[in-house]
Amino acid sequence: MEYTLDQKRANDAYEALVKYLAVCQRSEKECAEKLYSKGFHKNEVEFAIDKAKGYRYIDDAEYVRNFLMFNKNKYGVKKLSYKLISEKGVDKSLVENTITDTLSDEYEREICLSFAEKYIKQKRIEDRTQIRKLTAFLYQKGFDWSVINSVVSGLFDVDCESV
């Protein structure tokens, strides 16, 4: 049975969405999930999201740019991509293109180096067994192996593959 659009419920969905977006910017998927959790039907959710998009309250491209601006110093590119695609539900090609345009390989290497230096200072790393912990930490932060290998070999004059 096809559900018809009840204009009052559709407007209620839009009102709920505006309240949800008043707190902070959200992706389209997050907005839809919130409305579904409040018991709205598909047509009502689509109406509310389309109307919010019309006012540019929801804009995934802008959301990705803002997310990167505030989180680029916290994670590597792999983890940023994962968070945006898997957790926030943003389109994969949009995320990849925006990351490519926004973050350079050199910038990711600099961030990785700063994480490594901070970790080394805090943990007082001196021998090879502890270098494995450093590389695992950097990988967990979302940096690519090639970046990690470059940073660690620059700091310790070793190849991560041999550690």
Image: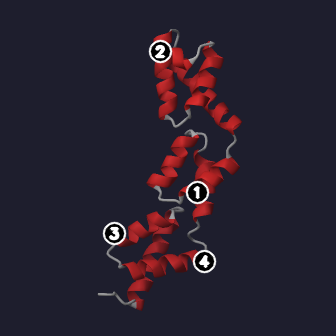
From the image, tell me which residue sits under label 3. 37
Q: Which residue is at the front of the view, 127 or 121?
A: 127
Q: Which mark is residue 23?
A: none
- The tag earlier along the polypeptide, 1 or 3, is 3
- The tag earlier along the polypeptide, 3 or 2, is 3
Between disc 1 and disc 4, the foreground one is: 1
Disc 2 from disc 4: Cα separation: 53 Å
Residue type beneath disc 1: Ser
Residue type beneath disc 3: Ser
Q: Position of residue 114 (x, y in %)?
A: 62, 28
Q: Secondary structure at mark 1?
A: helix
Q: Position of residue 62 (x, y in %)?
A: 62, 62
Q: Which residue is at the front of the view, 159 or 56?
A: 159
Residue 73 picture quarter: top right
Between disc 1 and disc 3, the foreground one is: 1
Residue in the picture at 50% in, 63% down: 23
Q: Secondary structure at mark 2?
A: helix
**Proximity of marks 3 and 2: CB atoms separated by less than 8 Å:** no
Residue type beneath disc 2: Gln
From the image, tell me which residue sits under label 2. 130
- Using a 10 Å C-alpha cutoff, classify the residue at mark 3 as few (fewer than 14 neighbours), some (14 to 19) or many (20 or more): few
Left or right: 42 in relation to 150: left
Disc 3 from disc 2: Cα separation: 46 Å
Q: Which mark is residue 93?
A: 1
The relative height of residue 152 versus residue 64 in the rendered view (above or below) is above
Q: Secondary structure at mark 4?
A: loop
Between disc 2 and disc 1, the foreground one is: 1
From the image, tell me which residue sits under label 4. 55
Name of the residue lying farthest toward the left = 1
Residue 53 picture quarter: bottom right
Q: Position of residue 49 (x, y in %)?
A: 49, 75
Residue in the picture at 58% in, 53% down: 67
